[in-house]
Amino acid sequence: MHLGEDETASEKSAMKPEDHLRITAVIEFVENAIALIFSEDGHLTRCEQLAYDLAIELGMPFEEIVLLKYATRLHDIGKLGIPEHILSRKKLTKAEMDMMRGHPARGVGLLKNMQFDQQIVEAINYHHEWWNGTGYPSGLKGEEIPIFSRIIGIVDAFDGITSERVYHPIRSITEALKIMEAEAGKKSDPVIFKVFKKMMTRG
């Protein structure tokens, strides 16, 4: 789905109660595993809330918002296969960078036998694609990138910039938006980013 379309995804992929229970169980497992394997500072929860708020601003249908929330909560599931010392390192070797860049595909691999909605799987696989086509894993460009992935990419980047990381200090909301605005149209969907910026600067 792209902005401005009237198509309602809920008509194509309505979820049953057992689907929600299965996804919730997987999310709980993933979060417990993350807590055991490496430090998680609430990034997934914050991203989920930001994605939800942004989806509301974009006027997305309820069923899509539910799927987006699940996809956002699971977007880093592939990092479970990466050692903590690599995740927390300032500078990575080429091999380590390749391992990091493989986490979307590993996430898809973990979910492939769980009958997840295709929109969730695609969102996880493509959340590091860039608007100008220089992202990964497939070099998708513009609206070739699923809208869930475009939203996750924005909220993931924002939370990363405004959180303390080994490779940079915490930056303010204003600083983060300035950095991201300079990259809109390169990394992120410029239309969705404009909505996100307005949402984050609303008084």
Image (cartoon, rainbow, N blue to C red):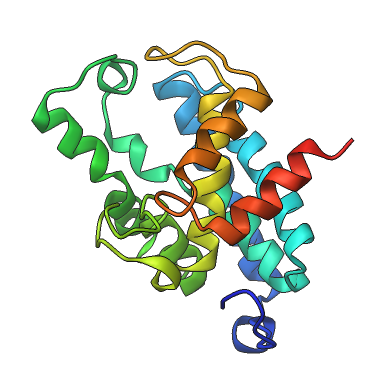
Quadrant of the rendered structure where residue 63 is? bottom right
Q: Can see residue 26? A: no
Q: Hey, which residue is sitting farthest right in the picture?
A: 203
At a point 41% along the width and 67% down the height, the residue shown is: 142
At a point 53% along the width and 66% down the height, the residue shown is: 147
Quadrant of the snapshot with the N terminus? bottom right
Residue 126 horizontal side relative to residue 12, left or right: left
Relative to 111, is 28 above or below? above
Q: Where does the image place residue 126, in percent across and percent down from the top left?
A: 38, 59
* Viewer-proximal residue among 87 and 37: 87
Residue 178 horizontal side relative to residue 116, left or right: right
Q: Can see residue 127? A: yes
In this rendering, the count of numbered labels is 0
Quadrant of the snapshot with the C terminus? top right
Q: Where does the image place residue 47, in percent across and percent down from the top left?
A: 61, 40
* Viewer-proximal residue among 3 and 113: 3
Relative to 197, is 130 above or below? below
Quadrant of the rendered structure where residue 84 is? top left
Residue 101 horizontal side relative to residue 113, left or right: left
At a point 45% along the width and 16% down the height, the residue shown is: 165
Residue 116 horizontal side relative to residue 199, left or right: left
At a point 31% along the width and 65% down the height, the residue shown is: 140
* Viewer-proximal residue among 183 and 6: 183
